[in-house]
Image: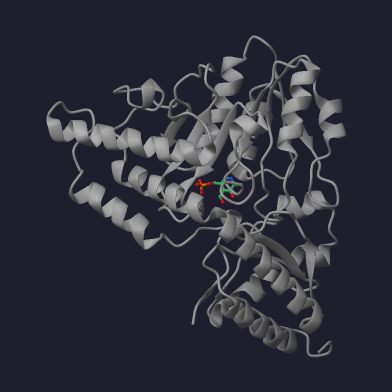
Amino acid sequence: MIAYLDNAATTQVWPEVAQAAYDAMTQGYFNPSSRYPDAGKAAKALEAHRAAVARALGCSPKEIVLTSCGTESDNWAIRSAVEKNRRRGKHIITTAIEHHAVLNPIEELEKQGYEVTRLQPNSAGVIELSDLEQALRPDTVLVSMMLVNNELGSVMPVKEAAALIKRAGAPALLHCDAVQGFMKVPCCPKQLGVDLMSISGHKIHAPKGIGALYIRSGLKLPPMIVGGGQEGGLRSGTEPTAQIAALAKACELGLARQAQDIAHMRELKQYTLDRIAAEVPQVHPVLVGDAPHVLALTMSGYKSEVLVRVLGDSGICVSAGSACHRGKPSHVYAALGLSKADREGAFRVSFCGDTTREEVDALIDALKNAAQTLFPTMS
Ligand code: PLP
């Protein structure tokens, strides 16, 4: 049996989602820009799919640009926001616990002369609004704050940050990397008050290779890719209609089962915590964030890469910190100020609406076995 507990890394594509992609490839394969009737149908389908994504975000379809992934959305949002505001200043605020899809483009801008303030999290893995308030300046042109941290499951006060930026009168555009928050916590860009929001398909049971950027209506950004003028001229290139159909289907299905899935993930998270507390004394939570799907744990004093491999040998899939940066020490755990032992032993368990208790039971059994073999003196 495989216990797939790495849903923050990626999710299994739902069969109906794969079917939607298959139908788009085999029946609706026409180029939406072509001029005959079947192509017109493909163009209509594309707009219906955009509308389904917009519905899941509670925004207008005109505010959605389809991209290839969360990383592309993040890179574009950041670069274009500072370009848009280039005459207003050269100060950027972000957090020390962003994904590298945000950290790295900001680091590039820093090399080009931008000044960057990186807000540190508190011990709950959350950014303090008072720190943001202090950091905001009249020349702050961008604030980039994630919605849910991918390694900790902590939820950032994005709505309050938006209100603060407005009150402060800073010209900053607010970008939110909602790749881990979409479908897991309230994630409506309008209600949060953000200007730009990134999401990714493969975290919500759509395939890899599709994402979206929400761009607040009225905000005109420089394009990501120029060429044939697709996506309103913002991201040229013949649209990946199959991936878009799949994303739309995942949004549609996800929306219908969202409340139930969130309740299910919360229950499983608590069940995992309870069983670990009762049965695996060598493991404890790094912290318990508010997101329902991510649980950061540590087997303090042991290297999590080894633990992840040992669990993997028993068919249990979890990740050592962020799967995107295998092998490298996590900047998120470092920012939290964890001890070296806790940091090195940290691993992440992450759920989806389809995760079963049996999978968690298999994890607990495997952890107990690993703890016994790895810590003979402690067991
Ligand atoms: N942002 C966060 C918070 C993530 O967790 C990830 C992926 O793990 C990304 C961005 C990158 O998304 P993608 O894999 O779609 O490029």
Q: Quadrant of residue 317?
A: bottom right
> Seen in the image, is 190 located left or right of residue 212?
right
Residue at 81% over, 41% down: 120
Which quadrant holds the C terminus? Answer: bottom right
Foreground of the two, 159 or 74? 159
Horizontally, is 72 left or right of 154 in the view? Answer: left
**Residue situated furthest top in the rendering:** 87
For residue 139, above or below residue 275: above
Q: Position of residue 330 (x, y in %)?
A: 70, 54
Q: Is residue 310 visible?
A: no
* Residue 21 or residue 210, whichever sits in front: 21
Q: Residue furthest left?
A: 36
Decide: is 129 above or below 300.
above
Residue drawn at x 69%, y 70% is 304
* Residue 236 percent coordinates (x, y): 34, 27
295 relative to 358 in the view: left or right: right
The quarter holding residue 308 reads bottom right
Q: Residue at x 30, y 51 (%)?
A: 21
Q: Nearer the viewer, residue 106 or 11?
A: 11
Across the whole image, how many numbered discs are drawn on residues? 0
Measured as percent of width and height from the top left, residue 61 is found at 43, 30
Q: Is residue 159 visible?
A: yes
Colouring convention used in this rendered image of the protein: one colour
**In the displayed structure, would residue 340 be above or below residue 25?**
below
Residue 366 in the image, given as x and y percentages of width and height = 64, 83
